[in-house]
Image: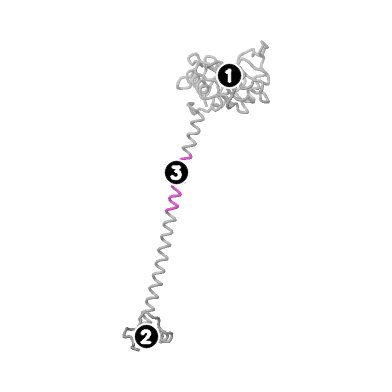
Amino acid sequence: MKRSSAPPNISAPLSRSGARRRSKTSLNNPICVAATTLVLILISLGGILLFFAQSNHSEIIHSNRGDVQEELSSSQLRRQQKQSVEIVSEEKGNVSNTGGLLIRTNQIGNIRISFRPDLAGPTSIQYIINVVEAAAGSSLQTTDGNTNNGVTCDRCNFYRAETKLLLQGVIAQKSVPNTEVLLGPCPIENYTPELECPEHDPNCGCHGPIMTKGMVGWAGGGNGADFFMNTFATPVNWWERQHTVWGELDEESIRVVESAYDLPATMKGMRMLDEKINFTIELF
């Protein structure tokens, strides 16, 4: 049989003996040893450089993320602050930032009424502000120039004191009509009145909460200018929800109001003070 003249397959693996012989030959060659060592050094150096490069890249990414998170946190804080301002603005409606009405008297002391536009709506508070400004002018000064004594309006006095129940008065200025003062909103959702209500007052009988101690509202279920301050110990359920509540007293002011019950008064269907308590007014 004739032998093939084709060259041997050079891709075939070497025998074990051949591999050992070549390995020994390479290890005994100084040039090969030096080359191998150099390659190992270069590989190690490349690995070190790669490690530092990755570490630096990681720090940069972390730093950038921190900056982004800090920027996002600042942005979120600004957005929350803006939303808070908007919420406060909505609660106060068109009413100014004035917090309440300070009533000054010589007979019983001073009374602080914090405004409650959330219960009355904006028009009741705006009416009181208009009375103060109209009575005092832009300087908010009394006729003697003393801004610490409040201002005097045309009709600002207390005239009725029902022991352990209420102190009633009026706050009015001739140039400030109360025709634009709206009754408070009914706090009951889907309220159905028991009475037949007129067109201009579809929620008749429901214009505020059940009054509790310290609440201040318009008298007679109306829209001013007569008002009263409730000091009854428990919720006054028999008044139901007919009164527009526009303010609230602090504890000290409640004690001042209660001191008026000791003043001389005469029963005339209602317990009327023998002498009216005149007062000055200012905003706080």
Q: Amino acid at mark 3?
A: Ser
Query: Quarter holding the N terminus?
Result: bottom left
Determine whether the residue tagged by mark 2 lies in a helix, strand or loop: loop
Q: Residues within 10 Å of mark 2 (few under 14, many from 20)?
A: few
Kindly report the secondary structure that dominates the magenta region of the rendered protein: helix
Q: Amino acid at mark 2?
A: Asn
Q: Are marks 2 and 3 in contact (CB under 8 Å)?
A: no
Q: CA distance from mark 2 to mark 3?
A: 69 Å
Snapshot colouring = one colour
Residue holding disc 1: 204
Q: Which residue is mark 2?
A: 29
Q: Which residues are magenta?
A: 64-80
Residue 59 quadrant: bottom left
Residue neighbourhood size for the residue with mark 1, other residues' Cα within 10 Å, grouped as few (<14), some (14–19), many (≥20)? many
Q: How many marks?
A: 3
Disc 1 versus disc 2: distance between alpha carbons? 112 Å
* Residue under numbered circle 3: 75
Query: Along the horizontal axis of the image, is 3 left or right of 138?
Result: left
The reply to whether the magenta stretch includes residue 262 is no
Amino acid type at circle 1 is: Cys
Residue 6 location (% of width, % of height): 32, 83
Residue nearest the viewer, comparing 92 with 210? 210
Q: Which quadrant of the figure has residue 42?
A: bottom left
The residue lying at 44 percent from left, 53 percent from top is 65
